[in-house]
Image: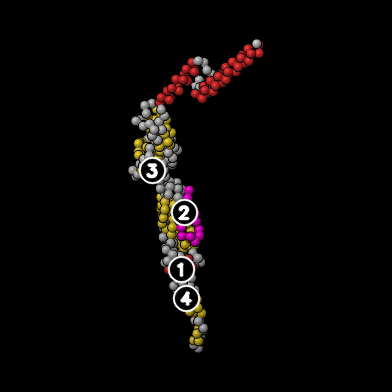
Amino acid sequence: MVAGLQPDSQYSVFIQAVNAIGSGPLSAPLLASTRPLPPAPPPLECSAAGPQSLKLKWGENASNTHTRALLADDVVYTLQMEDKNHRFVAIYRGPSHTYKVQRLTESSSYVFRIQAVSHAGEGPFSDTHTFCTTKSVPPALKAPRVHQLEGNACEVTWETIAPMRGDPVSYVLQVLVGRESEYKQLFKGEEGTFHISGLQGNTDYRFRVGACRRCQDTCQELSGPLSPSSSFALRRQEAASSGELCGGADAARGGAGAGGLISSDERFAALIVCVFAGLSILIACLLQHFFMK
């Protein structure tokens, strides 16, 4: 065995016989090459982080000659992640230079290492790298509900969500009035309802709401998507009150209908039926009178 040679190098070997008489001629050269060293681990970095995923990349740009040589040698990479028991588990093995780790937990740290493997053998693992997922933004809320109150006012209510991993959640209520092009903020707080007064008649109002997460560790505020809008317009109080009075009078007369309310269309139809019935009776009486004569 010949030791101390350079890796990935070619050598010419000659053989010569020697005895007491002297040295014989050298043999024809024998060409031999040493094997290359296993590839070194590539640099590992996180190119994009999300609440439930991490996108990792490694290696150099494909325009680099060293990277092209590695690709020509069919280098594959083994990416490992540390599990809950502090053991490294392979999550990817292949020739790609990127991998997206999914189904992770928000705002958590994960440890990775990588290894390159070629026909020369398995290279060493890289140093460990720690990457963190981001915090989740609040989900989109449903469209708010709007109820009219007395005195040109209304009440806007919306669903609330629980604190997100200990971070409180507040809400932003916006309104679009009439033909205006931009929403204006009406309210910001942790409540799930808001009263609005001084509304104008013959005006359309559109309300929408969004949730905001206040991160206690970084004092950062993460805003979720805004909800679909809910439209609202004031109903005339006079029509509503007159309808209630008619309904109360009908109920006092002992009607057993749905809530004692009879619409104007129903009253008009009843009037027509009564008129036709009266005319029928009158015509019958006249015919009977003529025939009796």
3D distance between C-alphas at marks 3 and 2: 25 Å
Could you tell me which secondary element the residue under label 2 belongs to? Answer: strand
Q: Give the residue number, with chain letter if any, for mark 2.
A: 100
Residue lying furthest bottom: 21
Q: Quick check: is 290 in the magenta stretch?
A: no
Q: Quadrant of residue 66?
A: bottom left
Q: Residue at x 40, y 48 (%)?
A: 134
Residue type pointed to by label 2:
Lys
Q: Give the residue number, with chain letter if any, for mark 3.
A: 223
Q: Residue at x 47, y 54 (%)?
A: 100
Please tell me whether mark 3 or mark 4 is closer to you in this view.
3
Q: Are marks 1 and 4 in contact (CB under 8 Å)?
A: no
Q: Mark 1 or 2 closer to N-term?
A: 1
Residue lying furthest front: 293
3D distance between C-alphas at marks 3 and 4: 63 Å
Q: Quadrant of the C terminus?
A: top right
Q: Give the residue number, with chain letter if any, for mark 4.
A: 10
Could you tell me which secondary element the residue under label 3 belongs to? Answer: strand
Q: Residue 55 location in percent, x, y?
A: 44, 54
Q: Are marks 1 and 2 in contact (CB under 8 Å)?
A: no
3D distance between C-alphas at marks 4 and 2: 41 Å
